[in-house]
Amino acid sequence: MRARNLTLLNDERYDVLVIGGGVTGAGVALDAVARGYKVALVEKTDFASGTSSKSTKLVHGGIRYLSNFDFALVREALTERGILLRIAPYLVHPVPFILPMYKGDRHPVGLPFTTPRGIGLGFVMDVGLWFYDLLAGRLNMKRHRRLSRKRVRQLAPTLVTKGLNNGFVYYDGQTHDARLTLAVMRTAAQYGATIVNYAEVTSFVMEQGKAVGAHVHDRLNDQQLTVYARHIVNATGVFSEEIETLTGDTPQFQVEPSKGVHLVLSREDLQLGDNAIVLPETDDRRILFIVPWETRAIYGTTDTGSGDLNHPVANRDDIAYLLEHLNRYLSVSLTEEDIISTYAGYRPLLKPRQNSEHSSAKLSRTHAVFQDHSGVVTIVGGKLTTYRRMAQDTVDVLNKRDGSPALHPTLDMPLHGSAGWPAVKHDLEKKAKALGLSEPTIAHLGTAYGSEGLAVLALIESDPSLAELLIADLPYIRAEVIYACRYEMAMTPYDVLARRTSITLLDRQRGMSVVDEVATIMAQELDWSPADRQSMIDAFNAAMHDQMVAEKTL
Ligand SMILES: Cc1cc2nc3c(=O)[nH]c(=O)nc-3n(C[C@H](O)[C@H](O)[C@H](O)COP(=O)(O)OP(=O)(O)OC[C@H]3O[C@@H](n4cnc5c(N)ncnc54)[C@H](O)[C@@H]3O)c2cc1C
């Protein structure tokens, strides 16, 4: 599939070339192809390997933006949350969030003001959450409720009780960020977009000051190709400014990357059921989330400065900050030893250049579409939740240039795997049971692939050994490795272990122990030589090793 797409990239002329295979680029490719454009997308590493696999995995309005009275931003995100629940019902689901209120808190949820001795802050929170429900409009999931102290303790039994007044429960969405990106990407491919990973834009083809194409480096075969397109969209997140500079123009914006780290912890250690917990106030006036995610809990996040944008890692300080707040709010005393895995990513926060027409307050939180003199269109900022709207705003600019009407087909376009869902769920469960799969694996196939789970089952029908688990108590099966290579363009063991599945997150140590087996399956599927296979294993182990060394470094 990849080889065929590379040939197409070189031979065809496109209407739109999208640079960047995170959720934003995937969204732009889908929106453009759905409006009838001929689209190509190139990603320099793997799909979702940047920020789009490093998020808190929430599809949310962002209650902390309410504290800044940023109602337009919250409303936009809540609207997108509602749309995503509809167009990707197997990938996005509601989660209850328990927000405890403590006597000592003065700025819960990042509130910029306080009241004398914190009196009345509960009322302020109630009003804020009422607004949150209101802004979601008819797409709201479920209204927030006030909880008694006793009820908070029942729902979040590890919260420290000293100073606990009462609390709230409110609802937001949760997803699998990398699989959401893949679902958007595959929908775009289904509509005819030509999509290639491990293909890096290194420079632009310029004609009379305009960018008319891009030179692309196929990093797996070390080959160069040239892709021509009428419109070029830069959707490279924290790399946007770097790409803009390739045109020779001074970018109108600056990207100020901000690192966010998450810890993956055991749900049993935290006695975490199906409710997420909000730690309402940190020393630097932020909030932290503990969210049940698959068989684990993910906890984060931090908000610190920049580093190597290609290799974001959690360091000792990040981990100490997170553990300190966790042990402050929960009656546990977890240490580095209890961490199952970590991950880190950079937020693409926007900062305008001086004399730019865009105002700074808005830019830092929302997304913006820029057009430079070379004609390259850049989309940057925003959130995972708002990817569809970001894409829509970008393709509107292309329609405007072409003088064609701006239609918005993605508003109700089901994403790959959603066709017939949840009706197909019953069929999937029945077939999977007949093939002898366990309950956790059946549930996992549904939430990861939706109706496409049937294609995974078809692989088992032709080779029953593919039903075997990769790791004893995780739900992943061997068939998924083949599926990832054949249908999801997985090219390395890391692609399979970190993004097509979540094995490195859910159990990094055992992920390392299974890499040989995964590489063996991939070698057969992708026709690797023994040397190729070994170098893939070495690269995976080196990446894991670097991550673990960084965690011990200041
Ligand atoms: C810690 C953290 C937590 C977050 N939590 C949430 C959350 O819970 N909910 C939410 O809605 N949002 C969340 N976000 C925000 C969200 O994750 C991002 O807004 C979103 O993933 C950005 O996607 P993107 O496609 O713009 O960027 P990216 O995913 O970074 O994609 C850009 C891609 O461009 C590629 N690229 C770069 N240069 C080139 C080149 N020369 N050629 C080809 N490709 C190139 C990169 O490899 C990369 O894959 C979070 C962000 C962080 C950091």
Image: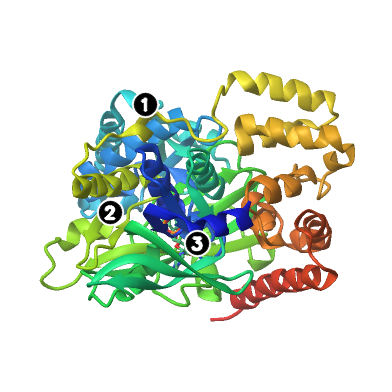
With respect to residue 224, does 495 lie above or below? above
The residues bearing labels 3 and 1 have C-alpha atoms spaced at a distance of 52 Å
Q: Quadrant of ligand 1?
A: bottom left
Q: Is residue 41 left or right of residue 179?
A: left
Q: Residue furthest front?
A: 11
Examine the image and state in which quarter residue 213 appears.
bottom left
- Numbered disc in front, either 3 or 1: 3
The residues bearing labels 2 and 1 have C-alpha atoms spaced at a distance of 28 Å
Most foreground residue, 111 or 182: 182
With respect to residue 408, does 164 lie above or below? below
Most foreground residue, 335 or 238: 238
Dot placed on the residue nearer the N-terminal end, 3 or 2: 3
Most foreground residue, 321 or 208: 208
Residue 297 position, x and y percent, is 60, 49
Task: Assess disc 3: are there few (<14), some (14-19) or many (≥20) residues with their C-alpha within 10 Å of its C-alpha.
Answer: some
Residue designated by label 2 = 367
In the structure shown, which secondary structural element does the residue marked by tag 2 occupy? Answer: strand
Amino acid of disc 3: Asn
